[in-house]
Image (tube, grey):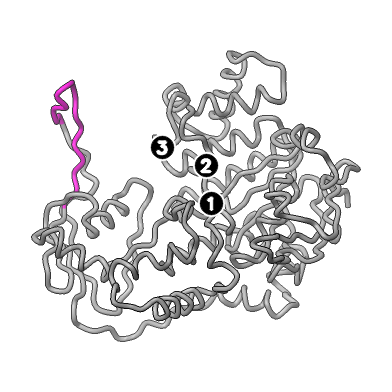
Amino acid sequence: MNNLVQIKNLSVGFQSHNKKSNVVKSISFEIPKGKTVALVGESGSGKTVTALSILKLLPYPAAFHDSGEIVYNNFNLLKLKQNEIQKIRGKNISAIFQEPMSSLNPLHTIEKQVNEILMIHSSISYTEATTKTKKLLSQVGLENISERIKAYPHELSGGQRQRVMIAMSIANNPDLLIADEPTTALDVTVQSQILDLIQNIQQQMGMSILFISHDLAVVKKIADYVCIMKDGEIVEKNSTENIFSNPQHSYTKELITSQTKKKVFENHSDNSILQINELKVWYPITKGILRRTIDYVKAIDSLNFNLKTKQTLGIVGESGSGKTSLVLAILKLISSKGNIIFDNQNLNNIGKNKMKNLRKEIQIVFQDPFSSLSPRMTIEQIVSEGLEIHQKKLSKDEKKDKIKKIIKEVGLDYEDIHQRFPHEFSGGQRQRIAIAR
């Protein structure tokens, strides 16, 4: 088999607060030319750290390698100097990351950002780069290109932003594309479109893909080979067909079984915890200096439902269907009309002070954990913030015990994480922290 990249005995560790932690432990695998290899595992298993090692994007010198080689074109990438690896990034090896909103520069237009990656690796003018950028955006299925190219990232939907990221990643015809959970934050319809797009581009360009995911259904669809990671080690690797038809390791069997488990529905209480009656969320369209309202975008129009105690209700829909507007209206973070009855109280009829007391009873976990966690606060400060607002009578020791218990409940180690910051964690770990908060 003709391999494009070989990872040999790779170890990755981090030095933080006078403490060393080994995150990836002597792993080895190959990425064949023109094939897709999937790294699969739960949050914190070392998938993203492995991928970032290939591009030397880890926070060196806090990050270090006790052992290992990453061989590409007969070069050990780990031995390359900064100016040497920069020539490879974005040209020979490129990446799509999990959170496109965090990956794109909010201050620059799409045109400028795609043009930049073209101009860094080739001697072309800005006008020539713009022409190529338009072709790339058309190739990845972005519509209204003349309008979108002048837009800023926040003006695009999640799916559109991810298409822009794909356009940037294939701009210089790379040999290897690293796709780090590229569809996690997207709705199911858009997720399927992005996966099809990645596969079509791979067939056209003949590039290899390192695909990182925790979703076995997605992996089964897109990958040729699978490596299962647990606690920084590869516990099993094989062809996709063999992994799913004949798994060998107990952890692999557990992952596959967990995907096929059916939820057992229990009898719920007849008491309603939340009732939505004739809810409307309309966003005004304004015009002129005086911002005169000329029309409305009807995000939610006369919505009704009833949620009972201990019941889980799924709200499903494509981007722009009103899901987030509904949640923000329930939290009274945006204005709405109609009745939002929580625990026999109409939230649209109560004042700010009473609503503040109710907020501890209605909590939210946002879609993008990186944007919802303060980069300047430690994990302990983030998790304790709600306790300081709503449970002021707790002593310092009681508060610390509660924080330790909550962090353990979401599958994290208090001693390992409490003095660290959000950027030091994977996307899945950040979401666990958001749940703990």
Q: Residue furthest bottom?
A: 267
Q: Amino acid at mark 3?
A: His
Mark 1 vs 3: CB contact within 8 A: no
Q: CA distance from mark 2 to mark 3?
A: 12 Å
Mark 2 vs 1: CB contact within 8 A: yes
Quadrant for residue 437, please give it: bottom left
Please give left or right for residue 403 compared with residue 292 in the image. Answer: right
Task: Pick whichever, 177 or 390, lies toward us.
Answer: 390
Q: Closer to us: mark 2 or mark 3?
A: 3
Q: Which residue is mark 2?
A: 162
Q: Which residue is mark 3?
A: 154
Please give left or right for residue 94 compared with residue 192 in the image. Answer: right
Q: Is residue 397 above or below residue 207?
A: below
Q: Which residue is mark 1?
A: 183
Crowding near the residue tagged with mark 3, few <14, some 14–19, many ≥20 C-alpha atoms within 10 Å: some
Q: Secondary structure at mark 2?
A: helix
Q: CA distance from mark 1 to mark 3?
A: 18 Å
Locate residue 199, reporting x and y percent: 64, 45
* Residue at figure coordinates x 44%, y 74% from the top left: 403
Magenta range: 280-294
Task: Pick whichever, 217 or 413, lies toward us.
Answer: 413
What secondary structure do most residues of the magenta stretch adopt?
Answer: strand
Quadrant for residue 158, please give it: top left
Locate residue 38, reporting x and y percent: 69, 58
Q: Amino acid at mark 2?
A: Gln
